[in-house]
Amino acid sequence: MQQITYQNKFNRTQARGIKLLPILSIWAAVLVSAFVFLIFVSDELNPIREFYLFPWVLLTGVVVAMPNVYLWYRNSFHLFHPLTLAAWSYFLPAFFAGGLILAAGFSEPYYLAFIQNIHYDLPLTMLVIMLGYIGLTIGFFLPLGRKLGEAAGKMLPNWEWKPENLFFPGFVLLILGFFNNIFGFVVGVLGYQKLAEIGQYDGMLFLMTLLWLQASFLLWLVLFKRNKLDFNAVLTVGVLMVTGLLKALYAGNRGGLYQLFILIFMAYLLSGRQFKLKQGMIAGGSLILVIFIGMIYGTTFRSIKGTEEQVGVDQYTENIFATFEEVGKRDNVKTLEQGFSSLAERLDTVSVLAVVVSNYEDLKPYEEGYGLDNNIWKDTATFFIPRVVWADKPVASEPRLYSELYFDYGENSFPITPMGDLLRNYGFWGVFLGMALLGFVLRLIYVSLMDIQPGSIWRITFFYMLLTSVSYEGFYGTIIPYFFKVGFISMIGILIVHFLVKKSVQPKF
């Protein structure tokens, strides 16, 4: 009877999620209309110049949208469904919007010169992107994934955590994670700085910093599930906002505020709260705002700091204040121009992937010299051996070496995407099969954590950690290893919370 109650609750949540599609359609129409308007009113742009790319970009948008339309038709549409999240958080902005930006001439990076036959390789790149998302979709809908997910979900414990009992355990986990973040920043694991040499315990330290992320999501989820304004709620919101903003500032990148927004937004939706047109418009406006602010802050901060050389905490903090001072001195129009320019540059991932598509066969003989050859197999086969045991364990998926080989600039980490990594290693069929495997794994996770005992706080938290660990911008070779690492550290955090809940340690704030 209890299982039926949970299932009915989850079905109601899913039904509310169906209303998201019209909201997203409105925002998509607004953004596309604004983009078309900018193209045709600009004297500096000739939209016909790269017209050959527009049909390919539009076809890519259709391919990415269709599985989500199917989910809507099946009453299974939810903004944080694995396929939907992949679509709106990466594939559509990076490849659809990014493709439109590239075709219209808003983005003209220097590495376009590295594409050997631009009129052939850019459409071919769009085909690779479509092949990747089709593979992800087919892999997700394979019946075996659901069956294994159901079996795995039934083996997991059916812990029932009451939101009122989670404030103290959540704060314990938050403090533990926050101090690990401070220590990780001091030693150079976090922030806009890089280690000269990877130490034996640096990987474990980085994973321990994720406890802050897990605790923050858990506490936001508790707040939204309680839906009660009292001292505990006010205190928790204050602490979460202060720690979240500090982490975003010291990250020194353009995505810190965006990640904080996604954390809160995902906790809101997965808590079962209603999401109507009003909330959709507020969320959409807030998303655009945090993206713009993040672009301006991150770009200015990196310009002021200059390099990723590790500096003292005092100097790093001075750079943050200098960033605000520099932004405050600028003309508002110039600030907006910088935001648009940074956003256009950031969204255009098509041209970056096209460099890989155009050159991977010619550069393959040189990859061994950079340690990039067979990186997917190497990283997957060796990830379970900790660096404490194998101090000289090589890092096969190294962004700087990849950037140096393909873009002749090793001081920046250019996106490669799972499709680009699979293409380098296994060719076009490898793109489809590799993304299908990823879709299969995502289905297993989704079913075991969200279909079995829906509404369970610990399962939702675990699902959030695993789902957001997938990077559609980085190497495919790091996805599965990172799954296991994040799953391991997340389970430690869940066990800590469960132990404290079980002991009923509930002091009053």
Image (spheres, rainbow, N blue to C red):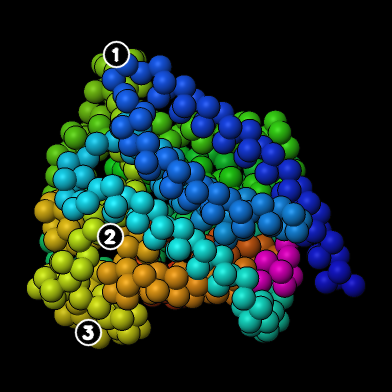
Residue 241 seen from this side: yes
- Residue 384 appears at what percent x and percent y? 35, 83
Q: Residue at x 35, y 30 (%)?
A: 48
| Residue density around tag 1, few if under 14, some if 14–19, many if 20 or more, within 10 Å | few
Number of the label disc, if any, that sits on residue 435: none
The answer to which image quadrant residue 99 occupies is: top left
Q: Secondary structure at mark 1?
A: loop
Disc 1/disc 2 C-alpha distance (Å): 40 Å
Q: Residue at x 29, y 13 (%)?
A: 331
- Residue 404 appears at what percent x and percent y? 13, 58
Q: Secondary structure at mark 3?
A: loop
Residue at the right extreme, as displayed: 1
The residue wearing badge 2 is 357
Disc 3/disc 1 C-alpha distance (Å): 53 Å
- The amino acid sitting under disc 2 is Val
Is 451 contained in the magenta span?
A: yes
The residue wearing badge 1 is 331
Q: Residue at x 66, y 52 (%)?
A: 69
Q: Nearer the viewer, mark 2 or mark 3?
A: 2
Q: Residue at x 49, y 75 (%)?
A: 437
Stretch of the chain drawn in magenta: 447-455
Side (left or right) of 18 relative to 173: right
The residue wearing badge 3 is 390
